[in-house]
Amino acid sequence: MANKGLFITFEGVDGCGKTTQLKLLSEYLKNHGYEIVITREPGAKGLGEKIREILLHYDGEVSSRAESFLFLADRAQHIDKIVNPAVESGKIVLCDRHTDSTIAYQGYGRGVDIEQLSVLNLLATDGKKPDLTFVFDIDVETSMSRVGAEMDRMESSGIEFFNKVRNGYLDIAKNEPERVKVINANRTVTDISKEVVSIISEII
Ligand code: TYD
């Protein structure tokens, strides 16, 4: 039977630089002979693309609980159809956002009950947690300046919202220090990448 792979998630406020770091880590791991799958939430291939379109571009009112369920529906599909099969076949899955986004954005940001969201996250993932999570922590003024003027539905939520999201991530990391590693993202791409690689090197 194939070795079991790894499931690694990348988290942080919009504009924190996590997607750049995900790509750099993917290159590093490929160069070291690992089989990598890059994926994201919301919006992995298939049904996820449809859900993403609603979440980011629907221009009518969306209640916070309805928004939560849409992210969760995307997650359940993503875990069942993409993440689990890849991990079980021995691949390393690098995923741009996952369960912690729902706790940080819908829980801390929008004010949806965090305990209930945690239970729903377990339902969506069938109880599976990432092996490792990076939270790229950055001050919100810097991250928002990177997002720029053309904002999607989530990005238009305002500075106060994103400060709550940022604090949410820091709380999550405090509660689960083994799984969740906070990376200071107010640094150069190279410095951040070196730290990511050094953390990964300890587990592979
Ligand atoms: P995306 O364009 O993928 O942003 P980024 O490149 O910053 O990841 O949009 C995803 C948006 O959805 C982002 O604003 C975070 C938000 N989101 C939630 O609010 N809850 C969730 O559970 C997930 C997965 C994402």
Image (cartoon, rainbow, N blue to C red):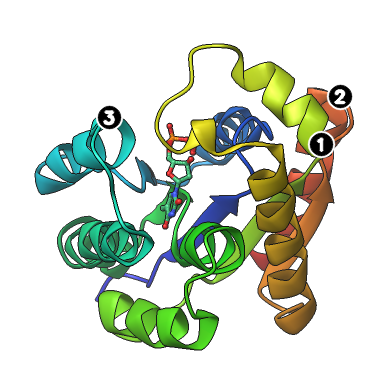
Residue 12 shown left or right of residue 137 in the figure:
left
For discs 3 and 2, the disc positioned in front in the rendered view: 3
Determine whether 172 is above or below 35 in the image. below
Name the one closer to the observer, 121 or 55: 55
Residue position for label 3? 57
Q: Type of residue at label 1?
A: Ile
For discs 1 and 3, the disc positioned in front in the rendered view: 3
Label 2 near ligand 1 (CB < 8 Å): no
**Residue displayed at 13% across by 39% down:** 50
Label 2: few (<14), some (14–19) or many (≥20) C-alpha neighbours in 10 Å: few
Question: x and y percent of residue 55 in the render?
Answer: 28, 42
For the residue labelled by badge 3, is the local secondary structure a helix, a strand or a loop?
helix
Quadrant (top left, top right, bottom left, bottom right) of the C terminus:
bottom right
Quadrant (top left, top right, bottom left, bottom right) of the N terminus:
bottom left
Residue 180 shown left or right of residue 95 in the figure:
right
Q: Quadrant of ligand 1?
A: top left
Question: x and y percent of residue 168 in the render?
Answer: 69, 65
Residue 192's disc is 1
> Considering only order in the chain, which callout, 2 or 3, is on the residue closer to the N terminus?
3
Question: x and y percent of residue 10 in the render?
Answer: 57, 50
Residue position for label 2? 188
Question: x and y percent of residue 14 in the render?
Answer: 59, 36
> Considering only order in the chain, which callout, 3 or 1, is on the residue closer to the N terminus?
3
Name the one closer to the observer, 2 or 198: 198
Determine whether 15 is above or below 162 in the image. above
**Residue displayed at 10% across by 47% down:** 47
* Tags 1 and 2 touching, CB below 8 Å: yes
The answer to whether residue 137 of the structure is visible from this angle is yes
**Residue displayed at 46% across by 77% down:** 129
For the residue labelled by badge 1, is the local secondary structure a helix, a strand or a loop?
helix
